[in-house]
Amino acid sequence: MSQSVMQNSKNVLLYPKDGKPSIIANEWLIWNGTDHGQTFPEIEREQKVLVPFQWWLSHGQAQAKDSDSELARRIQNQTIGVWFAADDDVLKHAEVIAAGKLIWPVVGADFPIFRDGRSFSTAALLRERFHWAGEIRAIGDVLIDQLIQGARSGFDSFALRADQNRDVALKQFDLFTVTTQNSWRDRRSQLNGQLNSQAIKTSQ
Amino acid sequence: MYKYDYIDQTLVNERVTQFKDQVERRIDGSLPEEEFRPLRLQNGLYHQRHAYMLRVAIPYGLLSSDQLRTLAHIANKYDRGYGHFTTRQNIQFNWIKLEESPAILADLAKVQMHAIQTSGNCIRNITSDAFAGVAADEYVDPRPVCELLRQWSTLHPEFAFLPRKFKFAVCGAKEDRTILLCHDVGISLKKNPQGELVADIYAGGGMGRTPILGSLIKENLPWNILPSYLTALLRVYNRFGRRDNIYKARIKILVKALGPEEFARQVEGEWASIKDGDDNFQQSEWDRVANHFTKPAYKSAQSISTQDLIDGVPANEQVAFARWLERNVKAHQVAGYASVIFSLKPHGSVAPGDATTEQMLAIADLADQYSFGELRVTHEQNLVLADVEQSKLLELWHKAKAQNVVLPNIGLLTDIIACPGGDFCSLANAKSLPIAKAIQERFDDLDYLHDLGEISLNISGCINSCGHHHVGNIGVLGVDKDGEEWYQITLGGEQGNHAAIGKVIGPSFGAEQIPEVMADIIDTFVKHRTADEAFIETYRRLGVTPFKEAAYLNRSKENIAGAGV
């Protein structure tokens, strides 16, 4: 039964902000958190795992305070992170997320279906508001044709759905050499010297 | 008009390459239809009843003659020799092959056109005043802001998969010609007392199943701050707009549920942290873009009075020419110039908004000869030559006659706005084109039409309201009942500064009844109007009752649908 609530991609597409995209072996298991209540599931000690943010809020935080707990050990070993559901409101939990920056090496944001774009805003907010510098991974129904939007909104890794062709996926990032709006990854393209480096300040 | 720079051209070329790859993956089967669908929609490709339909963006309704020639060529090479201008100032081709769509996009890219975001749950092509830059009542030319926003919204990564489609309109004139309040976001431009360009923002308007007029949520926003403010607004919508029910997913439902004040407060909250961000426009960007919208090389000419224009015409043509001047020629900012509307609403012969390859080519030539090589598309589905010398009006009228685009019915009952309806569209419940044709044939008397004065009649084949029936003085909506097509009538809708949503008068009518129902409604107006009262004024004065009574009087039950339809 526990198998049905775990997602374990073989590999992930890693695309660091200032680096090149590549396919690497996946180290992070994703626990769906659905049938365990407050109990942390039985997972190999060394296996890194992302737990649902809602589970973290309800149970994880409290358990982690006990220094003998499984969670405390995992925080120590950097083998635990959280993933945000599409309807998690990250702005409502600013303190938890600020604290999480120190203990979660990776966070995920879920796409329940590929055409649900909420997690693009989640990633953008994590980068803009929380200045999240660590890895943000797209999980769930992640398809080739969301990669460009994801990479620009704030994601730097992608647990592609198993059937997605990795070679085609890697080529996506070469498709566009220009952009016409700023994003986490790049500034809008400018012909030489057209844009001053400083934005206009508004008094509003 | 705006000319692409290296960046714009590169982006559009690269988008063609991307879409070509997506189509190839669809054809080789690696991309299933369900997953391809949102991708093709984001490039304007629908699957209709008979074939694919490609909707090409005409940003804020502005076209060059060369672009129109390319559209004519596409209609000829890839379609059946015509195109359909839409209520959102775009053009649609109805008979497209999927395999050929990348080649069409490549042809479009050569004349700085594309189909990006003409459909899908993303920021759609931005619409504006068809008379931008020339209207006599303009405060601010909206085109630089439209173009800057076109660039900003093109392939915006965060807002590519919104809960539902998202439509911007931008206006800058005393009289609103954009149906601003029926858009997800309406941007009303003006100058503040210091002479600076600022925007009032209206949110949550729309037609469709739940017609609502937008609410003012922000005043006096400096033009350059639009990107950060719109990011905040779209982010609130992207995160909290409903995704569980397609019919409740538009921003209007969110604004209504929260209330405009609370929605505005949430946007302000989001905006506070990004308003000084580097996404905002800079003066140098304004200068680069606005430089393309300078005035053309107008000749210095004296204004010519309408009477003098008419007096210069042979006696046997005076009545017809005078009518055309009255209905199809509009005042201009510059002395000695006028804007000319070509009617794509000939009575009963073609679908409203359709133009053939031959017409498009000829009209492109007329634009070169008489209007600096530029045209505009109106949301009423007509074409405009915006900068015509008054002294050339007669000559232009003669030449345009040969193209069957001088019918003097602009703003009159037969200047019908209509969607393609059930003849083409797979969403439609009922046909709209035969209804438009029947009404135009029933009222094919120009003297009578002129006496009636301004009446807008808008027809939608389904509740998606592409035919804008909610804002027609008379609206006709196709509905389905047990597999049969019926038509619901609304009265009292209006666009412009007094924008209003029409009210349903009662049960629906069968298709064959519609022309006579229209006649009964019009007769009621004629009976009650005072002096030069327009239809909408009489309606406002009397309310719906006399019109409703006339529409249902002596009409047998089998011609009226049961309750609730």
Image (tube, grey):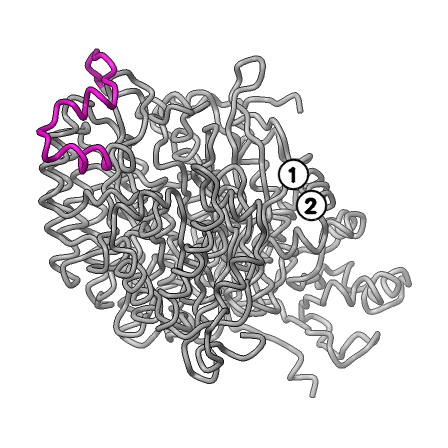
Residue B49 part of the magenta segment: no
Q: x, y (%) of residue A77?
A: 74, 61
Q: Earlier in the sequence, mark 2 or mark 1?
A: 1
What residue appears at the point 27 percent right and 62 percent down from the top-left corner?
A: B437
Q: Quadrant of residue A136?
A: bottom right
Tag 2: amino acid? Pro
Residue B335 vertical placement versus B185 (above, below): above
Residue drawn 22% across the image and 66% down it: B95
Q: Is B299 covered by the magenta stretch?
A: yes
- Give x and y (percent) for residue A105: 67, 55
Q: Secondary structure at mark 1?
A: strand
Q: Which residue is mark 1?
A: B217
Q: Secondary structure at mark 2?
A: helix
Please give the name of the residue rendered at 24% of the width and 53% of the height, measured from the top-left corner: B105
Residue B219 coordinates in the image, percent (x, y): 63, 30
Q: Which residue is mark 2?
A: B260
Cα–Cα span, label 2 and label 1: 7 Å
Subunit ID for the residue under disc 2: B
Q: Is residue A103 visible?
A: yes
The subunit letter for the residue under badge 1 reads: B
Task: Please state which of residues B413 and B77 is positioned toward the viewer in this rendering.
Answer: B413
Range of magenta residues: B297-324
Residue at x 63%, y 71% (from the top left corner): A29
Is there CB contact under 8 Å for labels 2 and 1? yes
Residue count near mark 1 (Cα–Cα under 10 Å), binned few <14, some 14–19, many ≥20: some
Residue type at mark 1: give it. Ile
